[in-house]
């Protein structure tokens, strides 16, 4: 967790905001493309699932930013513990939603699983891009 904190300390708040905004726009575009393409191929529910997974990823990142903003207002050593427990709760809920969808409607659930994975790939690509632009090395 400390390494992740160190990584994000490399960025200013406007840079993090730009990364998140860019990720959300790319995710929205891919969601629309996924629905259109899968509808043309006859697997509409998979496309809707991908769009749902991308929305879950965007919502999760948005909740992370709100949680960090609230935690930064507090003083004390419990901030990391609060952030870690909130993150664990969000990931647990996301996992439960996707597993429930896979159980109920397989195509929708598998599409949502792919959408969440795609979202985090886009997000990490944006972070790596920003790091390379700054010239940060490991």
Image (cartoon, helix red, strand yellow):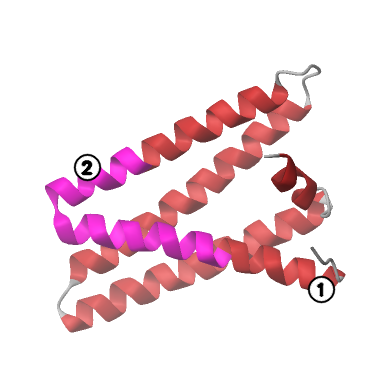
User: Relative to residue 78, is residue 87 depicted above or below?
Assistant: below
Q: Is residue 10 left or right of residue 71?
A: right
Q: Quadrant of the N terminus?
A: top right
Q: Is residue 31 left or right of residue 131?
A: left
Q: Is residue 29 left or right of residue 126?
A: left
Assess whether residue 124 is covered by the magenta stretch.
no
Neighbor class of circle 2 (other Cα within 10 Å; few <14, some 14-19, many 20+) is few
Report x, y in % for residue 61. Answer: 56, 47
Q: Which mark is residue 122?
A: none
Assess whether residue 105 is covered by the magenta stretch.
yes
Q: Is residue 16 left or right of residue 137?
A: left
Mostly what secondary structure, the magenta segment? helix
Please report the residue visible at 14 percent of the width from the left and 78 percent of the height from the top. Answer: 42
The picture quadrant where one finds residue 87 is: top right
Please report the residue visible at 24 percent of the width from the left and 76 percent of the height from the top. Answer: 38
User: Relative to residue 70, is residue 22 depicted above or below?
Assistant: below
User: Relative to residue 26, is residue 116 depicted above or below?
Assistant: above
Which of disc 2 and disc 1 is earlier in sequence? 2
Report x, y in % for residue 7. Answer: 76, 52
Tell me the SS state at disc 1.
Answer: helix
Please report the residue visible at 33 percent of the width from the left and 57 percent of the height from the top. Answer: 113
User: Relative to residue 109, is residue 126 depicted above or below?
Assistant: below
Please report the residue visible at 55 percent of the width from the left and 26 percent of the height from the top. Answer: 85
Task: Find disc 1 in the rendering and name its residue.
Answer: 133
The picture quadrant where one finds residue 63 is: top right
Q: Quadrant of the C terminus?
A: bottom right
Report x, y in % for residue 28. Answer: 47, 66
Q: Which mark is residue 100?
A: 2
Tell me the SS state at disc 2.
Answer: helix
Residue range corresponding to the magenta coloring: 95-122
């Amino acid at each position: 967790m400390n390494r992740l904190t160190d990584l994000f300390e490399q960025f200013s708040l406007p840079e993090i905001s730009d990364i998140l905004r860019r990720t959300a726009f790319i995710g929205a575009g891919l969601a629309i493309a996924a629905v259109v393409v899968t509808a043309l191929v006859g697997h509409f529910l998979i496309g809707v699932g991908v769009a749902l997974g991308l929305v879950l990823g965007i919502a999760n990142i948005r909740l992370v930013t709100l949680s960090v903003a609230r935690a930064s207002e507090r003083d004390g050593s419990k901030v990391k513990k609060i952030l870690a427990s909130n993150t664990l709760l969000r990931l647990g809920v996301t996992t439960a939603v996707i597993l429930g969808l896979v159980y109920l409607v397989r195509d929708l659930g598998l599409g949502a699983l792919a959408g969440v994975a795609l979202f985090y790939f886009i997000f990490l690509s944006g972070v790596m891009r920003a790091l390379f632009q700054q010239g940060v090395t490991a």
